[in-house]
Amino acid sequence: MQSIRYWLVLPAAGGGNRFGGSIPKQYAPLAGSTVIEHALAPFLDDGRCSGIAVVLSPGDQWFARLPVSRHTRLRMVAGGDERSDSVRLGLASLPAVDEDWVLVHDAARPCVSRDEVDALLAATMNDPVGGLLALKVADTLKVGDDQGRVTSTAPRSALWRALTPQMFRAGLLRDALARAYQDSRVPTDESQAVEWLGHSPRLVPGSARNMKVTQASDLALAEAVLKREGAAR
């Protein structure tokens, strides 16, 4: 792969209401560490990463206690009400010029592999728009109504499930998030904000192992994935 450098924004300001418990899901213990530390690991070990903005809730009392918080390439930033606000604020804190690449990765995705990051960089580094890791939908998808009844079956051949990291030029991502904020629109991921500007990001096949921890029961599966990958190395 030709030389490439990038910045990382890791939004970690969410409360994780569906997770339950006394701490946000990103700080849940996982395989001898925490969810957020596993999410950061592939990037902290990557010499191509110029710096990382970890975006935290203004009242966060957990991250500064972790040894990783003292990493020299990492800065802590206060987030906003929505995930897109947190990404926008994290991006603003980085000294990235418009042409620099920026990756955005969920703090609740602890199982992303270095191979996936490499695949995203290789497939997207010469793309005029940018792209994201994604997984083709394998299940049959039903559209339901308010009464819980099927109204139609969605064709799955063109459907993908968005993963992270997502990768865009800093200038384009700034413009996309700023426009969404000005228009009072809340994108569910960075790709959607870029799509609203009329662009079509590249879909890069990712792994089903790159799961998002949403409920406490997801931790057992994430631990199994991490242990299996550790043994494979």
Image (cartoon, rainbow, N blue to C red):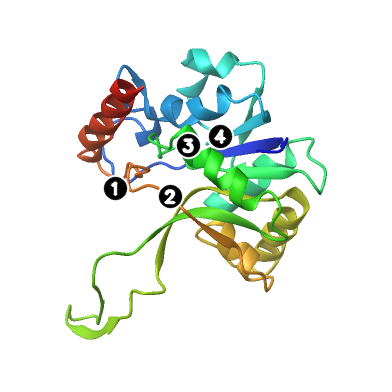
Please state which of residues 30 and 62 is positioned toward the viewer in this rendering.
30
Q: Are marks 4 and 1 in contact (CB under 8 Å)?
A: no
Amino acid type assigned to the residue bearing label 3 in the image: Asp
Question: Disc 3 vs disc 4: which is toward the camera?
Answer: 3
Separation (CA) of disc 4 from disc 1: 20 Å
Could you say whether the residue bearing mark 2 is in a helix, strand or loop?
loop
Residue topped by disc 4: 58
- Left-right relation of 189 to 213: right
Separation (CA) of disc 1 from disc 3: 30 Å
Could you say whether the residue bearing mark 4 is in a helix, strand or loop?
loop
Please state which of residues 40 and 116 is positioned toward the viewer in this rendering.
116
Quarter of the image for the N terminus: give it. top right
Amino acid type assigned to the residue bearing label 2 in the image: Gly
- Left-right relation of 211 to 107: left
Q: Quadrant of residue 49?
A: top right
Separation (CA) of disc 1 from disc 2: 25 Å
Which mark is first along the chain, 1 or 4?
1
164 relative to 55, above or below = below
195 relative to 204, above or below = below
Q: Which mark is residue 108?
A: none
Residue topped by disc 3: 115
152 relative to 10, above or below = below
Q: Position of residue 172 (x, y in %)?
A: 74, 57
Residue that protrudes farthest toward the front in the picture = 1
Residue topped by disc 1: 18
Identify the residue shown where x is 40% and y is 70%: 159
Separation (CA) of disc 2 from disc 3: 9 Å
Residue topped by disc 2: 206
Q: Residues within 10 Å of mark 1 (few under 14, many from 20)?
A: few
Separation (CA) of disc 4 from disc 2: 32 Å
Which mark is first along the chain, 3 or 1?
1
Q: Residues within 10 Å of mark 2 (few under 14, many from 20)?
A: many
